[in-house]
Image: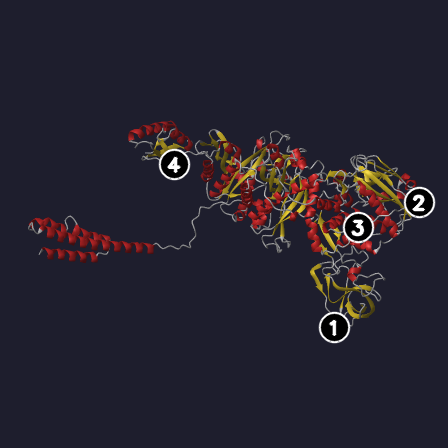
Amino acid sequence: MKTSLKWIAAMVPGLTSDPQEYTDAMTLSGSKVEFFVKQNADLDKIVIGQVNKIEKHPDADKLVICQVNVGSEEIQIVTGAPNVFEGAKVPVVLDGGRVAGGHDGVKTEGGIKIKAGKLRGVASAGMMCSIEELGATRDLFPEAPEYGLYIFDEDAPVGEDAVSYLGLDDVVVEYEITSNRVDCFSLIGLAREAAATFDLPFEPPVVTATGNDEDVNDYVSVEVLNNQLCSRYTARVVKNIKIAPSPKWMQERLRSQGIRPINNIVDITNYVMEEYGQPMHAYDLDQIVDKKIVVKNATNGEKFVTLDGQEHELDENMLMINDGQKPIGIAGIMGGENSMITDDVKTMLFESACFDGTNIRLSAKRLGMRTEASGIFEKGLDPNNAMAAMDRACQLIEELGAGEVVGGAIDIYPEEKKEIRIPFEPEKTNAFLGTDIDAATQLAYLQKIELGYDEATKELIIPTFRQDLLSFADIAEEVARFYGYAKIETTLPRASATAGGKSFKMEIEDIARDVAEYCGFSQAMTYSFESPKVFDKLLLPADAREREAIKISNPLGEDFSVMRTLSLNGMLASLSTNYNRRNKDVRLYELGNIYLAKSLPLEELPDERMQFTLGFYGDGDFYTMKGAVEEFLAKVGLNDRLTYDPAAGKTFLHPGRQAKICYDGTVLGYLGEIHPVVAANYAIKDRVYVAVLDMPCVVDRASFVKKYTGIANFPASTRDLSLVVPKDVLAGQIEDVFAKEGGAYLENFELFDVYEGAQVLSGHKSLSYSLTFRAKDRNLCDEDVNPVMDRIIKALGELKVTLRQ
Amino acid sequence: MMKEKLEEIRQKAVSEIEKATDPEMLNAARVTFLGKKGELTAILKSMKEVAPEDRPKVGQWVNDTRKAIEEKMNAAKEKMEQEQMNHRLANETIDVTLPAKKHKIGHRHPNTIALEEVEKIFVGMGFEVVEGPEIEKDYYNFEALNIPANHPAKDEQDTFYINKDILLRTQTSPVQVRTMEAQKPPIRMIAPGRVFRADEVDATHSPSFHQIEGMVIDKGITFSDLKGTLQLFVKKLFGEDTKVKFRPHHFPFTEPSAEMDVSCFKCGGKGCRFCKGEGWIEILGCGMVHPKVLKMSGIDPEEYSGFAFGIGLERIALLKYEIDDMRLLYENDDRFLSQF
């Protein structure tokens, strides 16, 4: 929403604030000003001049020398403008003045300074300007020539300030109006706010009775068949229309609002639209069959051509304005070509109605035509404003002599919208705001914005244009904003004890972040939605459960259309980005949800499972990743019963380098090397390792319970075992044997060497372990340890594991 | 006679000790003079040849000599060790400006760093950190927040829908409702999390971003409490000198509502390119929880009141770390992440 500051000031006598003061005060009282533009900020010393005499330039074909009367004197100006003529009244920048930009319409910040000088040897004391040089456009000043000087009308007073004569001395203020304040999408609404903000009188236009002795009902009849979608329909008739330009004052105000003046009738509708925030429509009454208006829904598949010449297909939920035979307008959106006003119009029908906002919004959306009128209607207008706007328009018709207003008005308004009442509770307001504003002051604030007060019942009477004021809290806000949010004290809530803090789940996630980072992984964040093509990229079989993803019904595109069911794609895509930017040795982790539907199509909310995903390429291998996983699990108390099962069954992982991560028999996640084909799908020509932990499973089992078990006082006895192991026997199996046969004294075992190569029997590998035995209460001797070692070696023998000779 | 001999031994020993240039030579001297087969020991062994009445005197002489040699020896040893130490230290001088050997530690995402700062401040004020679902029911995301069906605000938020009842939450505000349904006042909570809106990706928009919701519900909570709490928060986040400004605004689920601006921490409020010349930066939306919302969530608005606020996490991160393009936050380029 934007307003001319001059227009606002016309309704708020005494408003003399400069634009910055106005901006600050209005913003703090709730009408946020985005910015303001001083139209004449870059215009200086520009007067109306008259060209008295034109001579050829001796040295330039395209230039002429003009003697120009600028009121106080006659000056000589050299110009190249093609449209200059003797007697022309033109804007003249005097020596030392400024214009806003060039005649190509490109503005220069701070303007362009004009100095007296010589053009091809001939003295020139200033410059005659085009409309663009004055910072305006031909769109708003259609009478200006496409190329050349702006030529004033013959009445223009020579020597006067050209900028104010053109009305370019206004300030245009742009606001951000919130959707609840429908009343502020109008000059009157914002002027009311300004008056209240600055505590000045508010003087909206005084609308007087209009119309001749005739009766509108003799001209036209109106029938509304859908009162749900059209709560009020008012109509008046204007005859003997004389199309002409509107007066200068109206044109200036429209221009300041960014609206191009067209003719008196169009300008009046636009003017009232700006002033009252009520869209109006004018029909050529002579084109209306049976002189009858019927407001009803369209039929499915019906076609209709709007006044912009476009054909639209309608449906039964769209409200139409019809004559006795056919539709003549889409209610609240756009009129029809068949009934539009032309320059030949004799008699017209003015329509000012109130249509259902939601219906207009949805209809406009389906039609793909959000017009200025629909944009206003969809906010949900006050039906009581419709007739006020209608009467104002007719008043302007009479004032401007644009036609003869027929007496009376048609007003179909079956259910009048009534003012509501809200108790005036000043103490409660103070208690709610934390203020101490006396009742009289509070009431004064409210009365300034035209709320009524019933002393007998102590109730506030809410005018219908304030449909946002419904309850106590709304009134408290009105008091607060005129008292000033800034003046309300700052306090802290009186203490009711609340524990505060993070949940156990969040603490586990914090540890995941800490450990990942200590292990060299940086935190990534990727989107929750991705392309369904991801499943193919990851080589998932056609019946994979991961393919049962939740689809977004209105995605931004296929690439963002399904909710992820596994977290790998984001990780691989991020690693790919890094790889392709030649970043070396990149390690990333992410904590983010996957979304698993309990059934599809979705009937209840899905299972959102936090995944701890790690990935890297470059320095490191499978065991590096395994190390990171174990560091994390150990920190959350899950190190004692951890096992790895190579039968992880992940299609996207290297078949010989993957494992399920199990804790006490439950799968916590998986880790492995990315399948080379998958890595290639992500354009990574390096080995990529990933690990994914399902955090709900981890959180369920995690524990921070720790108990001190004492520090061993007696020395340990260590034994080394160098084993020759068949290749298909896993270290895990050997370690299971240690755990099972190690007995009470086996404190620890550690793999210190792995060797595969020439010196080992083919089909075998060599593993060397160091086993530590210790008793808590005494020194161990060979008699304690030897039998255990024998048992271990015997059990290993069953796995075809032998001692290296 | 004996005395001269001892003096001779002493002089010989001193001379040997002085000649010694390394511990071996010194040790050799020790063996020669003080060892089991050394010259002094030989003298002691020949004590039986000394007249018994002279023995204490001679014994004293021998001991004095031993002591003198030992002292000399120890002094020489100490000196030698000192020299050796000095020599070693001199040789071991390194170039301390050579590169460090580092265990490469990873970096936290700037969003998380910002979030943790915010969380720390609120947890310190007794707020609990809670979470809610990212795929949410229309009821919680809109209706229970006083945004009924067909409300224009639903369009404004460009919602991703799964179906007509289920959507990707457009705000963390539904967690307000879920918390009020699950908990009795007093409530002090913040709810950080991922939210979604159908915005095309560009330097200032992302279809997926994060908010931090906050809410306090108790008896007698006032608008001035809202102001005080949030002012304390931004002073802790952006520094003690930060000024705040509350502007009236509109949110369907709070009344009165406000937007809060903070004085630009780059220029201190004078106006710079960072704050687009305004001196103020918009930081969050807030307000008193709408009585209708309280009621719908099962809390009696006559007994309790409260305030709520919503902070754009990315906004905080972008501002705090002067990141000029939101896309950087989701590309995960190591060269970006390593700067945090």
Whether labels 4 and 3 share one chain: yes
Q: Position of residue B213 (x, y in %)?
A: 60, 40
Give the label on residue A372, or none: none
Give the amino acid at mark 2. Asp
Residue depth check, mark 2 versus mark 4: number of the one nearer the observer = 2
Residue depth check, mark 3 versus mark 1: number of the one nearer the observer = 3
* Residue on which disc 3 sits: A203
Q: Which badge, 1 or 4, comes first in the chain's sequence?
A: 1
Query: Looking at the image, which is closer to me, A686 or A331?
Result: A331
Give the amino acid at mark 4. Leu
Give the amino acid at mark 3. Glu
> In the picture, residue A281 is in which quadrant?
top right
Q: Position of residue B218 (x, y in %)?
A: 61, 37
Whether labels 2 and 3 share one chain: yes
* Residue on which disc 1 sits: A121
Q: Bin the neighbour count of mark 2 within 10 Å (Cα to Cα): few under 14, some 14-19, many 20 and up.
A: few
Q: Which badge, 2 or 4, comes first in the chain's sequence?
A: 2
